[in-house]
Image (cartoon, rainbow, N blue to C red):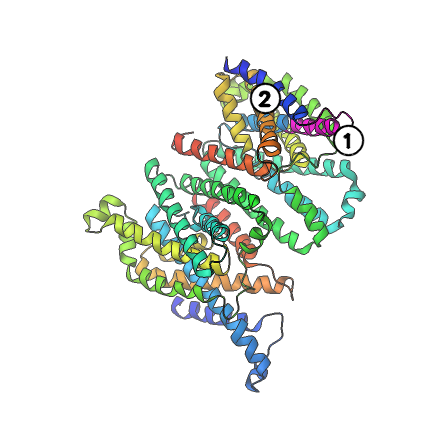
Amino acid sequence: MTRVLLPTLLLLLCGVSLMVGASQMSWSALWSASDDAWLTLTASRLPRLAALVLTGVGLSICGVILQQIVRNRFVEPATCGGLDAAKLGILVALTVLPGAGATGRMLFALVFCLLASLVYVAIIRRIRFTNLVLVPVIGLMYGSLLSAIAEFYAYRHNILQSMQGWLLGDFSRVIEGNYEIIYLILPIVVLTYLYAQRFTVLGMGEGMATSLGLNYAATAILGLVLVAVTVSATVITVGAIPFVGLVVPNLVALRYGENLKRTLPIVAMCGAALLLACDILGRLLIHPYEVPIGLTAGSVGGVLFLLLILWKCK
Amino acid sequence: MMRRAAWLLLPALALAFLLLGSGLDFSYVIPKRLVRLGAIIVAGVCIAVSSVIFQTLAGNRVLTPAIMGYEGIYLLFQALLVLWLGTASVTLLGAQGNALLSIALMLGYSWLLQRWLLREGRGDVYRLLLLGLVLTMVLGTFTQFIQLKTSPGEFSILQSLGYTSFNRAQPTQVLYSGLLVAAVAVLVARGTRVLDVLALGRDQAIALGLDHGRCLRLQMALVAVLVAVSTSLVGPTAFMGVFVANIAYALARSARHQVTLPLACAVAIGMFLLAQLLVEHLFNYRTSVSILVNLVCGAYFLALMVRTRGTP
């Protein structure tokens, strides 16, 4: 069932995503090889589709890796400070090295995100308190502290207002030539899939993983690096999109269990489908304008998260 | 000793706030500052009292109204008002009409929260906390979404509502809010003993002869009014309440509300005054009260959570 249904759904969403937009584009115009239609397709629609799918896949896989490392279902980049740290990194890059291009800014975001996740994991390990809910609570507090620092910093440099604008997840800026960094997610996905079994073992805890012959620290750090690369690449190209990495793995695990080798492709497809659906919704709600995906995905993901909390912690 | 120092510090801070760099200009600078001082005092009392009472009712020292989504609801409501009525909402309803509507809304939310969450959730603090934090984020997203649909002029009005600031309070608004808060304060002051009993938990309170349901409803209503007043006067304050209440408990070394409530008020007012002084004189307006409060209180809250290691 799933093997057929899910890919079909995904392809369908991809098709719809290509057709919807501010400028009307019909397939017949493409057949008649109208330059205008082709330009719309290759310069805007296809890059946007690629960015959407890659972001969806990347973010949901990030969620899976983090959940295995921290051993908590409710952890993802937005609930462990990673997203806020990446924003802070971009901000610092903008003021320290104003000339740095997207790559330079991404390096800053990556370093900040990695450091923040390491600190977060250290805090969680020190607490040694296995409570499903406490861990994300501390992560959210940590994230809001990081973003308070970012605000403090941005206010001093008079970029608070623009920061709020460009850090909200938004795919309307994605056009040919300024989104290619997002392809970094591809190798990350492949690596994650190759290491899927190790991450499953990682999720069994340090003692168990070590006795099964896994280098615990190295694998955990590898996971955090993969997450940091994905998060910084998405924040640089499209901005912050919260809750996707949390909701998708949880919903998939509810139905298909936790064997990563088997569920990882499903998680990836569901992540892409969720983002595509949210993006299409955002493009239709106030057509011909757009609602940024940070808002649509944030609302949908947030509401699903609330339901998960209510249901899971009974 | 510490307590006396805290009480002495407060008038000193207030005087410094009024006079520092004013050039003793009694015609313009000092009256303006008096209005701001009024807003600070009223809002400080609101935040302190509402947080302490809420924590007593919820039976823990982590949850506050701001965290449980009261402020998010208020901001969403203001955004909806502007969307439906446009900037005319200000003239159509008047400041008082808006305030009354907001209070009604807060009362409704309080009632929901009490029926649905506090009844079953007394033991499970962290679940409520996570729910509150996520709910606040989701409400913030909805608010942003509505802001998208407003015109730039309306947007700037809404944007300013989202930050703590003492500069937008009008003298009449401060006066009305002050009167309302004074009335609430009298009610609270007369009921501190009831609060002491409520803090023991539902069963003990009933065993001691308290009409638990009625008292709970009354106190929740008071909390709602206080939150509505403080949010409309100075904007949302996020984690300030947790900070204020916990510092007050530490200073008081007593669980009696007769001691903790006034201390919490003093801490809140002192904190606001200090932040405003820092912004005006040390940072020279290169930062804002909202950011300072978020930074300090956020760090404190995180430390509190990590230090207690999950045992409330």
Please name the predominant secondary structure of the magenta segment in the image.
helix
Amino acid at pointer 1: Thr
Query: Considering depth in this image, is A292 or B103 the residue closer to the camera?
Result: A292
Q: Are marks 2 and 1 on the same chain?
A: yes
Q: Residue at x 64, y 16 (%)?
A: B190
Determine if residue A314 is in view.
Answer: no
Q: Secondary structure beneath disc 2? A: helix
User: Residue B294 at what x, y percent from top left?
Assistant: 54, 37
Q: Mark 2 falls within which chain?
A: B
Residue A193, image x and y in percent?
32, 62
Q: Pinpoint the chain carrying mark 1.
A: B
Could you say where residue B84 lies in the image, as x and y percent from the top left? 73, 51
Q: Which mark is residue B85?
A: none
Within-10-Å neighbours for mark 2: few <14, some 14–19, many 20+ = many
Residue A235 relative to residue A201: left or right = right
Q: Which residue is mark 2?
A: B266
Please report whichever mark, 2 or 1, sits nearer to the chain's N-terminal start. Answer: 1
Q: Nearer the viewer, residue B223 or B237?
A: B237
- Based on the picture, tell me whether residue B39 belongs to the magenta stretch: yes
Q: Are marks 2 and 1 in contact (CB under 8 Å)?
A: no
Q: Is residue A156 visible?
A: yes
**A129, A151: nearer the viewer:** A151
Question: What range of the chain is rendered magenta?
Answer: B22-43
Q: Residue furthest bottom?
A: A32
* Quarter of the figure with the N terminus of chain A: bottom left
Location of residue A275 in the rendering, given as x and y in whole percent from the top left corner: 49, 61
The residue indicated by pointer 1 is B172
- Secondary structure beneath dot 1 equals helix
